[in-house]
Image (cartoon, rainbow, N blue to C red):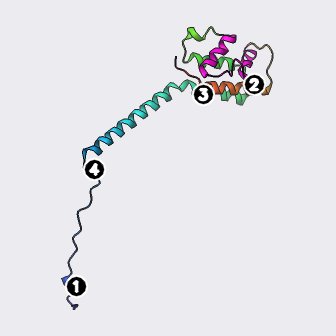
Amino acid sequence: MMGPDALENLHEIPLPEPVSYAPETIGWYLLAALLGALALWAAARWFRSWRVNRYRRAALRELAAMERAGEFAELPVLLKRTALSFAPREQVAGLSGERWLEFLDRRRGTDAFARGPGRLLPRLAYGVEPLSAAETRVLAGAVRDWIRGHDARL
């Protein structure tokens, strides 16, 4: 029955204990440790790859500067320096002509230098006859693709 003192007889409803978000079994802790170790391994691998490919980034920046300036005379030198960044000097320094183009193709897994636009490289390197603007753009594209995708494993 409701009366004037009915409010005094009300009691607080007891709330249940809050639910813990901590895992209750050791398996979750093991999974968290495994995921943490995996994340550390992936970060270390990414950092190593980033550090090892520093020469690629530098070569691509230099190529971009050549393209902005419209000066491609140093393109063969850039390509040789890039190859010397990962391959032993004995294997790369003495290469020229067809052997150099074959080396570049083997490292990329294509025939872009022996049979493609890379065939223009000796003309640019030795200055036999000047390249047109279109030929230079195509050659710069082949060099960019090679720098980005060559296989540096020996």
Question: Which residue was labeled with disc 1?
Answer: 7
Residue 5 image offset from top left, x and y in percent? 19, 88
Question: Could you tell me residue 12's position as x and y percent?
Answer: 22, 75
The residue tagged with tag 1: helix, strand or loop?
Answer: helix
> What main secondary structure does the magenta stretch of the protein show?
helix
> How far apart are the two marked residues, 1 and 3, measured between alpha carbons?
79 Å
Judged from the image, the secondary structure of the residue bearing numbered disc 2 is helix
- The residue that mark 2 highlights is 136
- First in sequence: mark 2 vs mark 3: 2
Instruction: Identify residue for label 4.
Output: 23
Q: In the image, what residue type sits under mark 4?
A: Pro
Q: Please name the residue shown 72% across and 24% down the image.
A: 139
The part of the chain drawn in magenta is 96-125
The amino acid on which the numbered mark 3 sits, given as a three-letter code, is Arg
Rounded to the nearest angstrom, the CA distance separating label 2 from label 1 is: 92 Å
First reached walking from the N terminus: tag 2 or tag 4: 4
| Residue 77, picture quadrant | top right
Q: Around disc 1, counting alpha carbons within 10 Å, would you say few (fewer than 14), some (14 to 19), or many (20 or more)?
A: few
> Is residue 100 shown above or below 138?
above
